[in-house]
Amino acid sequence: MKITKVEARHVPQSMWGNFWQQQKSVRGPSPMNEFARRGEGWSWYTWPQGITVVRITLDDGTTGLGYAEDGIGVATLMVNAHLASLATGLDAWSTEGIWEQMYRASIVYGRKGAALLAISAIDIAIWDALGKSVGRPVYQLLGGHHAKDVRAYASKVQPDDDLSVVKRMARDYLERGYQAIKANFPYGPADGREGLMKNIRYIAAIREEIGDDVDLMADAYMGWNRPFALEMIRELRPFSLRWVEEPLIPDDISGHAMLRGQHFVPIATGEHEFSRYGFQQLLDAGAADILQPDVHRVGGLTEFRRVAQMASGAGIEVTPHVYSAATLHAVLSQPNCTWIEHLTNPSWWGLDQRVNSLFLGEPEVHNGRPGMPTEPGIGLRINTDAVPDLSDWSD
């Protein structure tokens, strides 16, 4: 079954919907904490919001869709100017061979970052087309099992100076059936000892509200340095956190290994890592208790599967970054994936709770469990009301 066409279009809209609108101004650590702030939250330094959407066509007319974050259209350019020609004409079932060709051909400008976003989008589109061609959901093609129990954790509790509001958020998620909750830390090294203690009071308030039987995770979003992180995880021991996420920038692999070696709190990282080669470095260094590859960044479903299997061999749990239809298929396909992150907002905000409103068909989460995909392929369709420029790609 040959690939006859690969094409990409840039959509200058957020794939995060209402969640980006809330998150971009939220207070908290970030990799830019070393510099003077020039605006609210993340909004002053992040690239514009946008995605690249890839469509592939097979020789029998079957089409597949994939997408990845792409704020300025560079991944779209990489697909159309280079990677599309490599995949065109190849057997779509040769997923690993196609992946290797795209990765190796883009080494001079790729290996990480935008090139892997482009490869991810193409790879997901190929799997979508393959599933459609045989009338089966992609997780079944990847070896997934109907009986697998996948739980969603609520992400996230947002920082607020009023801890009663923080508690209300946590309680809202419990009432909606989630049995695990992740919170954003409010403070980082620039806030000194006072910020550290405020972080502790924040986590203590959430733990008090949800009790000891609910898993609690917390995210530093690459915003701490080694001294602050070491003191933080030491102070966090009494709260039985499921993990502390991205305490340091991704490139500080030895720093993650040092923190993990203290055995105070499990360490999670990987949402900003790319390809199995990056994750092999994390495994070799003993840098993480939980790996968090993003299907739309790591290299698509083909590379996610490789990473998950590497982690399984090392006895390491995989809990991927963010919720998407492709991510759910990935989780259902691997035995060492039992949790999936679900971006959500407090119900009283009255916002659309869909993670990605640019597409239709994303399985909904009810009572802390994602719905089982039943449609052939990934199961997504373009929401032409939200993205009218892609109406000609709507099946």
Image (tube, rainbow, N blue to C red):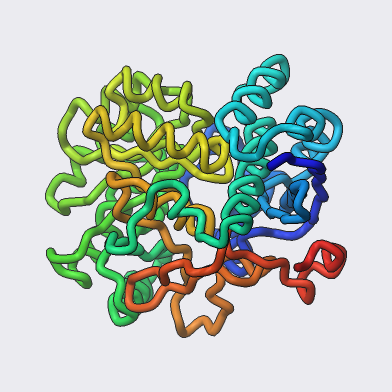
Identify the residue shown where x is 15% and y is 45%.
237
Q: Quadrant of residue 152?
A: bottom left
Of residues 230 and 153, the one nearer the viewer is: 153
x, y (%) of residue 109?
A: 72, 20
Residue 282 versus residue 289 in the image, above or below: above
x, y (%) of residue 373?
A: 47, 67
Of residues 110 and 128, the one nearer the viewer is: 128
Identify the residue shown where x is 43% and y is 54%.
140
Identify the residue shown where x is 32% and y is 34%.
229
Q: Quadrant of residue 226?
A: top left
Of residues 231 and 123, the one nearer the viewer is: 123
Quadrant location of the N terminus? top right
Residue 59 versus residue 117 in the image, above or below: below
Q: Quadrant of residue 77?
A: top right
- Whether residue 223 is visible to the viewer of this picture, yes or no, is no
- Whether residue 93 is visible to the viewer of this picture, yes or no, is yes
Q: Is residue 271 left or right of residue 134?
A: left
